Amino acid sequence: MANTLKIRTFEEYQEKYQQSIENPEKFWGEIAEEFQWMKKWERVLDWNFDEPKLEWFKGAKLNITENALDRHLETRGNKLALIWEPNDPKERFVRYTYRELHDKVCQLANALKEMGVKKGDRVCIYLPMIPELAISLLACARIGAIHSVIFAGFSSSSIMDRVNDAQAKMVITADGLYRGAKQIPLKRVVDEALENCPSVEKVIVYNRLNWEPNMVAGRDFKWEEVVDYQSKSCPAEPMDAEDPLYILYTSGSTGKPKGVVHTCGGYMVGTAYTFLNVFQYEESDVYWCTADIGWVTGHSYIVYGPLLTGATTVMFEGIPTYPDPGRFWQIIDKYGVNQFLTAPTAIRSLMAHGENHVLAYSLDSLKVIGSVGEPINDEAWKWYHLHVGKERCAVVDNWWQTETGAVMISGLGNISPMKPTYAGYPLPGVQPVLLNQEGQEIQESDVEGYLCMKAPWPSMLRTTWGDHERCKNTYFSNYKGYYFSGDGAKRDKNGMYRIIGRVDDVINVSGHRFGTAEIENAINTNDNVVESAVVGYPHPVKGQSIYAFVICESEIEDEALMRGAIIESVAREIGRIAIPEKIQFVSGLPKTRSGKIMRRILRKIAEDEIASIGDTSTLLDPQIVDELIAGKL
Ligand code: WTA
């Protein structure tokens, strides 16, 4: 992408920001000109937050893969697009140039077509962090199929919910995956899910572990048998700017996870523009984001943002502590990584292993180091800045969400002022406000409020799959005329934002989002459980951990056994990533007279903030609070 889009000084940022607010259509229209469109838009933006109606570059035609791959072939055909580092450092790494990646994507795209996948069809992808995962996203986009990636830590029951909600026609998976010293099955989990997924006609299975998994005749096909013989060219399907590109399921405060829908045009412009500017990417740089493509960070900042920019993006299959806690730093030195993006939970876990592991590597190549996915505490920020960044690199703290598609508030490489624990300033085109309880904008500084947006941005969600009303109710109804993020934030006197965390019933465990209701439903599937209430509490490494208060039907004879059963039900319904760290058996829950659980009280108990529980006299049964405190784990 042309360097004309890069902001180079803080003054320039301020100027651009002003322009983006005064005339968003002109601002984004000019940025969009830098991409390749098959047909120009009729209008840059048409919106209201009431329905909500959110249309960017309406009438335009494009294919995002033409912008991420073909557009670079002439000038960057031999440049590395993707470097893949395996779980085991002894295994060979894989590198694809833009030309090679283009060819791989076209081959899979041709296979999908041959197997009956058409524009608009949904394809669910349940794969390890291998190049074929990135290739699968792009192959879907190439032919206009809508991809929906399911993080490989989710259970069969979660897969089933997502596949059925999306009515997916195909699933792409692998026999299993490597995770440190462990091998974890995937195909078996998919098989279990598909027993209840009538929409799925075909499954492509990649061989990662040589496990020879069970194959259902007529339904399951080996990747190499359907892909390898395909032609390396495949025409890019012309897509409307507002056609869906993908669905990504994410948890909220109520019900089952919802399918956040992103569209082709705006998402392309938003991810590329933010990637270039947040990381201040230069043509010969090597960029690495440690996220999993199962989450939005991997979609936007391993695959789309970097490739749209013509960058070299690194993808890592393994975990930070295998074979030892120096693994990240070893990879940085191995490839000369210039921009590095990881999560606070990884930083804290490596911090706990001591600095010797990081001091063993030079890390000379690093210029910008990023943090994303959850609030970063002061201690972790400083450790990261000192030991990884050597006080030389810019630390960028990227605040955004699955729903926003791209970074919203963050420093821009080394051109923005840094302040530990502050995400910083809004990117051009982003208009954050802090609202008070009454929904009025707070003008003062050093005050906390609900973080909302008062204007649209190109990469924002358009709807929730199959249920527009839910999108409206979740994000656009709490405060009329605003997009509500669900986060609380604080703004200092210089206008920098610090994200405090969720103010709704969403728990962020190691950067993974879960709704309390979702976990409670899983716990309640247990025959012996009458009712449960789940809250988050601070955890030194994971950021937050899950505390469950559970009422059982009868006297529990063996608490350990019952805890085990509850853990199993959460693992079965959602995945092991969501199991509660603490489970307290109780005889009742603090409820208001209208029967609403007072989570605020449960949170105080879980956080050990007994003194600030406050007035309990309005509760139906105030004594229950004493019981909960006495039995606290
Ligand atoms: C939290 C991940 C503080 C926040 C990109 C948000 C953050 C939720 C930050 C979205 C950050 C993300 N500082 N909190 N830099 N980044 N969050 O959808 O609570 O997986 O609402 O998107 O993570 O999580 P999601």
Image: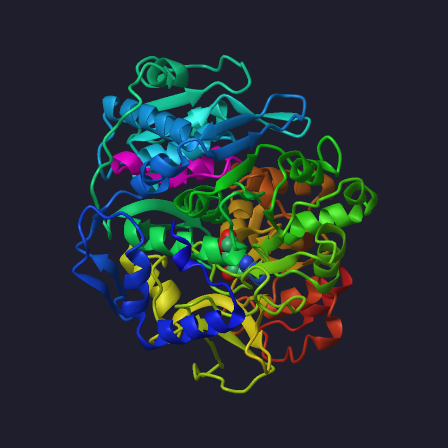
**Which quadrant is home to the C terminus?**
bottom right
Residue located 42% across and 47% down the image: 309
Residue 590 sits in which quadrant? bottom right
The answer to whether 606 appears left or right of 225 in the picture is: right
In this view, which residue lies farthest toward the front? 75
Q: Is residue 205 above or below residue 166?
A: above
Q: Is residue 191 shown to the viewer in this render?
A: yes
Of residues 260 and 81, the one nearer the viewer is 81
Expressed as whole percent of the image width and height from the top left, the position of residue 408 reads: 47, 63
The answer to whether 122 appears left or right of 574 in the picture is: left
The answer to whether 389 appears left or right of 506 in the picture is: right
Expressed as whole percent of the image width and height from the top left, the position of residue 40 reads: 19, 54
Residue located 30% across and 57% down the image: 32
Expressed as whole percent of the image width and height from the top left, the position of residue 426 reads: 48, 69
- Residue 535 lies within the magenta run: no
Q: Is residue 185 shown to the viewer in this render?
A: no
Of residues 601 and 97, the one nearer the viewer is 97
Residue 101 sits in which quadrant? top left
Image label count:
0
The magenta segment is 141-162
Residue 163 sits in which quadrant? top left
